[in-house]
Image (tube, rainbow, N blue to C red):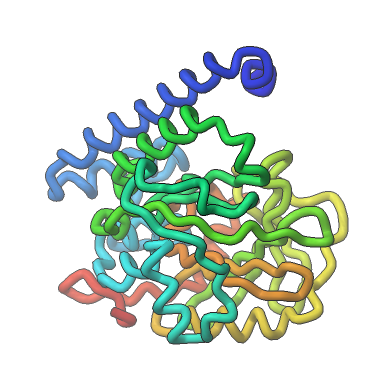
Amino acid sequence: MLDVLKKRFPGLYDYYQHMKRMKVLANAKRLESLPEEKYNNLIEKEYLKVFGNILDWNNLRTYTEKMQWEKIYNKNPIKTTLTDKYAVREWVEGKIGKDYLIPLIGVWDSFDNIDFDLLPKQFVLKTNHGTGTNLIVKDKNKINMRRAKRMFDDWMKTDYAFTNSLQLHYRDIKRKIIAEKYLETNLGELQDYKFLCFDGKPCFCWVDLGRYSKHTRTVFDMNWKLQPWTQASYGIANYDIPKPKNFDMMIDIANILSKGFSHVRVDLYNVDGKIYFGEMTFTNGSGLDPIIPKEYDKVLGDYWKLSKNKDGKTKND
């Protein structure tokens, strides 16, 4: 339905998407005004609505339960730096070198500051402080500038700490727009490998395919054995996914970048054998995307050693 609207009535489609973003912004502002002492109660209600279970803060057992604690109690400031898609680049360069960074084309404080005449024909434009806030440009001469400006202006107004429940480490990111090199692959689709790491050790690799068509998330262990679970928002690919030839190198990189964290997801791209860093994700799906089959929520929870102390920090802070 939306595809038809986009093709036949692009102006109406643009307005529809703008109103959706305005709804997200309004909800974020509502949550931003919520007193911190009410965070627990809000999360309890959200968790109950999604899972049908009452959240017991004193007995967190599953992956999604522990994620709720992570969102509001692990206040390690490094999470903000590493979630910032611009600031994280310096940190990654210090850990594994700049050869693994997607080449940066430019960085700006607002859409109006961008001189598109100076940009190459192809690039990816994104904000540094949100999720899903990107524009893939294969031919800059075909950009609808009015639509793009409205989109980025909406995104830059939004505090993503409050858009999908409470993910407070997004709150202090200084908002910017960045342009990175457009990555192409001989396979016809960008390979996105998301390493689920616990206590500095990669345990599973989620392979995301069909992001802009039929999005699947297929999970393998570190021996490339297919796992029977995924997240509810996705499906498992119904075709074979080959193991990358340099998979061991990807594991080594995820190992280095995840050191010192009880849990983090390290996202990497593999472009015809060339490995690129994607991002670090600390609160995957805000812990509100069910693991299916549901018994694997507990299996993943067992990997996460969430050792808490009185000041609300994990042993890794």
221 vs 293: above or below: below
Q: Residue at x 47, y 42 (%)?
A: 51
For the C terminus, which image quadrant?
A: bottom left
Q: Examine the rendering and report whether any part of residue 301 can be seen.
A: no
Left or right placement of residue 143 versus residue 188 in this view = left
Q: Residue at x 72, y 39 (%)?
A: 213
Where on the picture, by quarter, is residue 172?
bottom left
288 vs 14: above or below: below
Nearer to me, 250 or 282 = 250
Nearer to me, 3 or 199 = 3
Nearer to me, 27 or 309 = 27
55 vs 10: above or below: below
Left or right placement of residue 236 versus residue 76 in this view = right
Q: Position of residue 264 (x, y in %)?
A: 46, 70
Q: Outermost residue, front direction?
A: 117
Q: Residue at x 27, y 57 (%)?
A: 174
For the N terminus, which image quadrant?
A: top right
Nearer to me, 115 or 99 = 115
Q: Residue at x 35, y 47 (%)?
A: 113
Q: Position of residue 100 (x, y in %)?
A: 58, 77
Q: Position of residue 216 (x, y in %)?
A: 71, 49
